[in-house]
Image: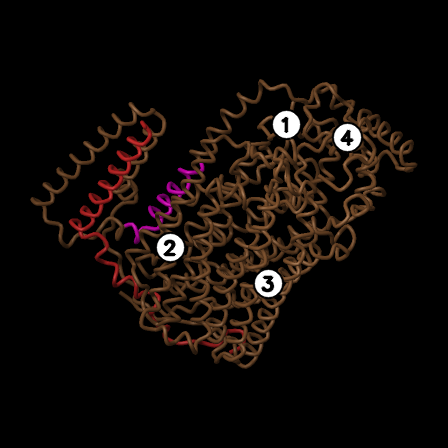
Chain colours: A red, B brown
Amino acid sequence: MEILILTVFVSLIVAAAGVLFFAWNIHHRAHEHIEQLSLLPLEEEARREPRKDRA
Amino acid sequence: METQRITYDDDIVRKFIAASVVFGIVGLLVGLLVALQLAFWQANLGPYLSFGRLRPLHTNAVIFAFVGNMLFAGVYYSTQRLLKARLASDRLSRIHFWGWQSIIVAAAITLPLGLTQGKEYAELEWPIDLAIAVVWLVFATNFFWTIARRNEKHLYVALWFYIATIVTVTVLHVVNALSIPVSAGKSYSVFGGVQDALVQWWYGHNAVAFFLTTPILGIMYYFLPKAANRPVFSYRLSIIHFWSLVFLYIWAGPHHLLNTALPDWAQTLGMIFSVMLIAPSWGGMLNGLLTLRGAWQELRIDPVLKFFAAAVTFYGMATFEGPLLSIKSVSAIAHYTDWIVAHVHVGALGWNGFMAAGMFYWIIPRLYGTQLHSRALANAHFYLATFGILLYAAAMWTSGVTQGLMWRAENPSGGLMYPSFVETVIAIRPMYWMRLIGGSLYLVGFLMMAWNLWLTARAGTAVDGSVDVVVENPGAQPSNIALIFGSPVLLSVFALVLLGAVALLGPAGSTVALVIGASVVLCAFVFYFQRDDTEPRAKAPSWHNLVEGKALAFTVLTIGAILVGGVAEIVPLVIAGNEKLALKDHAPYSPLELEGRDVYLKEGCYNCHSQMVRPLAWETARFGAASVEADSKYDHPFQWGSKRTGPDLARLGGRYSDVWHYRHMLDPRELSPGSNMPPYPHLQDNLIDFASTPDKLRAMRTVGVPYTPERIAAASGEAEQQAAHIVTGLAREAGAALDARSELVALIAYLQRLGKSGATDTPQSGDAAPALARKGGL
């Protein structure tokens, strides 16, 4: 039974840590930069040029 | 501030794609041949093209040649564009390309010749291992040098996965390849037995994780948004996905060793972390699939999106099945069976193969300034390949479950219902033919893709992308040290230390540690929130935002995340394992047995036979007493295996006579009707040079095997003496005229030693066993 009590206790601690970490993120406004960064791959190239040795 | 035009090096991308397609065909063809050999043993075409030597060629070709070249192409294409910088050095790029192709060619030559280290997915001998390290270093230098010259401050998520790939593969390859050379084509792993097992599967599992998964996830994060023309579903999720995946993956290796002689604590760690892996894996899968939101209708017409969507779906299936298979009780049934083969092929053909196809179909028209030659052909490829994978997986799932259930089936009196192993081999043969059909369909689809891409390239002209960038002064930046020791990192380290204390201190101590830890965390948060009230930081960038702009800090943190698991699992076992096992009474192999073991490695016997009896009732009833750590103490490398096409051999010694082994190696079906084992008549004619035997014992002594200098000096004579004893017995019992130096004699000596301590019963020989006893196999 000792292990059951410990398991429940550890689970509660982990869950509480998760909630606190989430609150910290919200409060700290972490990751607010991200919507702009997600657009990075979508930028188009200016042009495509023939390879130099074939030009 | 000035404007520069950057022209990308796309020629190197074209080269890697071409190599990937060519080697993909080769790898699949070899795969078809080995699949045929399992269904139809006559397809074993002599010693160089037998299953044991070709199966490593198949896996190496698919993993390192096909997927390797594909990932280099994807990394080089996307990295240049995400950093708005041409690759740092054209010369390094070419050295990387030609060096990698040379390694592949070297593998294609040496593996059929039987030059192997005998470690799965790490078979290549030490000179090639050194070349791999050098070429990988060239790749890493080129990549990080390009990052240093970048014109885009932030590192997009795809680049994080590439960084994790480069640093982790370096660590894995260097540690697992540590070996003592005996000659140019022979070496022995510095790790032995249970330690080697843990290191090998730490490497093997993470080769899947960091060679077949993380770089492909990076490719997914770049090419899927490009193809769908919309941003990734959630950038926040990608941050969580990345850190949790790289941290958890590295711990999961021991799930390949469940129910073995590996200490229980390591098995449990491997199982728990494997189960946890489903969270980041599915987070990544959903992030990929949901990127297609609003674009689902495109799937009907766009073959690129079809391949990407199916690839991510296969990734989801494989990463659900992986944690399932990592549960000890499931592993008890599935391990060593074809279920595992199904699992890895869903990943390789579905996830890697389809991501490659999607990327090739998207990228080749752009690299040649034209349109794809035929969308219809690409769509046909998709449906053919999907059906092929499903057929393949269904066949192997059925075969695997059949094997697992037949091995454990009991009759009403409590004995084994199928005591002869070969009964299970015969039962699954139809599934082997079905697998062959599925694989053939996949290959046909792949050939269609190659043809389509070839015609596309011919219709266009090679072009290189370019972009105009504004070069800005980056301004003041936070230091790397400040970021590496930032509050999220310190908090994570604190949490890890706390969990470590919980694991080590026992119930009472761990409860106290948790209470103290929770109190500290709570106080820290209260303090932090109060501080923020007096110091508004609304415009300050977040810690992770800053890290994304600092490649060095990011790389150091990634190394830290991947090292924790490896160190926590391997170091205690290496330190404690040596002390514990040093007390056991177990003699090293005799010189002839060691030579025979090298023959066993050369022929790739470990590809079909395990040497690990698990402590499960049906296994001990079939194979004998459960294996313990001491059994493989002097095995450099270990030979526990991962698949049982044939029976386990851990307790084989003395079960059959020398004559039985002699006749079985020449014609397996004479003694085991229905067996699919290749015949090995060439072992009679291949002669061992006993003059080099002392060098082998010397190398073994270097890695810790207790051979005395006197025994090393007399090794050649001892080997000849033991061989003469076996040859005399074979001549008397079977009328065989064998040269005492033949590989077959040494192999018999080794097989007769398996499962014996060797301390009191040398020379090992099965002469006492009844001739041709137990006909029909184990």
Q: Which residue is mark 1?
A: B702
A16 within the magenta span: no
- Disc 2 chain ID: B
Tell me the mark number nearer the camera, choosing from 2 and 3.
2
Are the residues at dot 3 and dot 4 in contact (C-beta closer than 8 Å)?
no
Question: In this orientation, does residue B130 appear?
Answer: no
Q: Which residue is mark 2?
A: B282
Q: Earlier in the sequence, mark 3 or mark 4?
A: 3
Q: Which residue is mark 3?
A: B24
Residue drawn at the location 52% of the way across and 59% of the way down? B91
Q: Are marks 2 and 3 on the same chain?
A: yes
Q: CA distance from mark 4 to mark 1?
A: 19 Å
At numbered mark 3, what does the secondary structure look like: helix, strand or loop? helix
Q: Quadrant of residue A32?
A: bottom left
Q: Which residue is mark 4?
A: B592
> Compared to B3, does B516 lie above or below?
above
Q: Are marks 4 and 2 on the same chain?
A: yes
Q: Amino acid at mark 1?
A: Thr
